[in-house]
């Protein structure tokens, strides 16, 4: 069963910004808050890759390709994780997904991010 719903993608020009949302509508607070959550992306013809993660305790990690440009944050009461993406370039074009970092469940539909002029 899909646990997370992604939104916020779209078409943006190079150098632009987007903020993605990852919500867990079926979870209760006590289930969501202890989770470590990852944002992943899959570009056409490429494997899915982890781009950012946030731990239950607040620690964050980023792939080298997005470090300094992306920021992940989490609000447990809203059962939501965000990915703020700045200085976007064409290599960021992909479908973005979120999931449980430790034990990924079924993948949602993701949200498409297209960076193009």
Image (tube, rainbow, N blue to C red):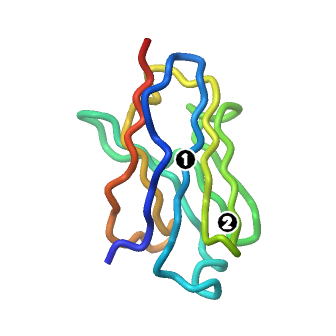
Dot 2 surroundings within 10 Å: few (below 14), some, or many (20 or more)? some
Q: Residue at x 70, y 66 (%)?
A: 75
Q: Residue at x 42, y 53 (%)?
A: 97
Q: Residue at x 51, y 65 (%)?
A: 101
For this view, does 24 lie left or right of residue 67? Answer: left
Name the residue carrying label 2: 55
Q: Position of residue 76 (x, y in %)?
A: 69, 73
For this view, does 34 lie left or right of residue 27? Answer: right
Q: Quadrant of residue 84?
A: top right
Q: Quadrant of the N terminus?
A: bottom left
Q: Position of residue 43 (x, y in %)?
A: 33, 35
Q: Residue at x 47, y 58 (%)?
A: 98
User: Mark 1 to mark 2: distance in Å?
Assistant: 18 Å
Q: Position of residue 72 (x, y in %)?
A: 66, 50
For this view, does 96 lie left or right of residue 51? Answer: left
Q: Residue furthest top?
A: 117
Please, what secondary structure does the residue beneath circle 2 have? loop
Q: Residue furthest left?
A: 45
Name the residue carrying label 1: 20
Q: Is residue 110 above or below residue 79?
A: above
């Amino acid at each position: 069963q899909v646990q997370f719903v992604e939104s916020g993608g779209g078409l943006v020009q190079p150098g632009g910004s987007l903020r993605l949302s990852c919500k867990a509508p079926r979870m209760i607070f006590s289930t969501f808050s202890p989770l470590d959550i990852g944002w992943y992306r899959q570009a056409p013809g490429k494997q899915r890759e982890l781009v950012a993660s946030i731990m239950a305790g607040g620690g964050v990690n980023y792939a080298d390709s997005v470090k300094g440009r992306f920021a992940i944050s989490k609000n447990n009461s809203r059962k939501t994780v965000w990915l703020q993406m700045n200085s976007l370039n064409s290599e960021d074009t992909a479908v973005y997904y979120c999931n449980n970092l430790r034990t990924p469940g079924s993948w949602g539909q993701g949200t498409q991010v297209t960076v193009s002029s």
